[in-house]
Image (spheres, rainbow, N blue to C red):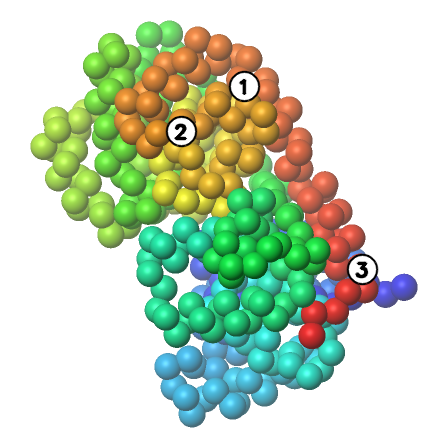
Amino acid sequence: MAKPRVAILLRDLGLGGVERCAVLVGEGLCALGFEVTLVLLGGSSNLWRERIKQVKVVDVSTQWQPLRPQTWWRGWRAVRQIVREHDVVLAGSFLLPLYMAYAASFGLGKRVIGWVHGPLFELDQFARMNPVHRHACQWVYRRLAELVFVSEHARNSLARWLEMPPRAGWQVLPNFVDAEQDWPRWQARAPGAPLRLLFVGRIAEEKQPQLWLDTLSALNLRGIAATLTIVGDGPLQAELAAQVAERQLGAQIHFAGRQADVAAYLAQADVLLLTSSFEGCPLVVLEAMPMGVLVASTNAGGVYELFGDRRSDFVVPDATGAALAELIERQQERALVLQNFLFKRAQHYAQSQILARWASLLASTRTSQ
């Protein structure tokens, strides 16, 4: 029996987590014999050319321009033709990919699956989604029989957002780490050297960057020498730099800027600091686990699921610098035990295992519309 042909609708192929997941899943499915097409709706950016070997990429952004209504009919027809040529349509995220997946497949009897990467209830509470988009997204999600979530928390969050119980067709398929990536060996710090903290992500409000400084200050009060490397950029970078200077923490903090490959930074870190208000299934934590990098995190939704019944060893209930510093100090007392746990736990998120579940899902015979 021939494997179904899969079209994944995306905005573009930037360096975001959604795009990375789409490339990894798409390439992995191609290696298993599936035919996968990534459809770019909102832009021609493709920062994954070197990683893409088998997936077909189709850019329809020149025909479909969301801010130009006169292009909508032409763009819809272009995507609808792609949908006709595939068996499964996967909306890579909400908003434009979700709308187009539903509209372009309407009446064709195609299988349509929504891919939900984050906790939409918390996201809407934080960002206050435009009411038109909120109602439109909710309307479409309620009409799709199948949804794939990166975590149980994301699944429960959508149910709360839609004010309805989860359905049988709502599956959880977590993210995974690229097995083809050449990960460097973790480097233990020299005896007596400061503890090496690392943050990877946007310097933005939802990441609560003030907690980074609060954590360093709390560690200082405990007599624990530490440094923090920040890999990323964002709208709050200038404000954060000013706070660093005001609190005289400049000697302990290094701004590394945005990096496409964070492996080298993880290899030289003792603790990955995650201070988000909400998360779906953060890839950077999955990347840290097989390297034995400890994680100190706020209770940011899907993060705690990654640690199973050892949640209290890596997640604090209260989002304060004092709580994170206390957790980090406790972790150092039993670092080897926790590292061994992370090595084993990472096997639950092996690429081969998650891709096998994707293949099983797509090979089933359920339809969405």
The residue closer to the viewer here, 57 or 243, is 243
Q: Earlier in the sequence, mark 3 or mark 1?
A: 1
Find the residue positioned furthest to the left.
246
Mark 1: which amino acid?
Gln
Gap in angstroms between the C-alphas marked 2 and 1: 21 Å
Identify the residue under disc 1.
Answer: 339
Give above or below for 19 relative to 176.
below
Residue shown at the point (31%, 15%) measured from the top left: 194
Residue 364, label in figure: 3
Secondary element at tag 3: loop
- Confirm or deny contact between disc 2 and disc 1 (CB under 8 A): no
Identify the residue under disc 2.
Answer: 317
Label 1: how many residues lie within 10 Å, few (<14), some (14-19) or many (20+)? Answer: some
- Which-is-in-front pick, marks 3 and 1? 3
Q: Where is residue 77 in the image (x, y as percent from the top left)?
A: 59, 87
The residue closer to the viewer here, 117 or 188, is 117
Q: Position of residue 229 (x, y in %)?
A: 31, 31
Q: Which of marks 3 and 2 is nearer the N terminus?
A: 2
Give above or below for 188 relative to 8.
above
Residue 19 seen in this snapshot: no
Residue 214 seen in this snapshot: yes
Give the side of residue 303 with respect to residue 245, left or right: right
Give above or below for 93 relative to 279.
below
- Which-is-in-front pick, marks 3 and 2? 2
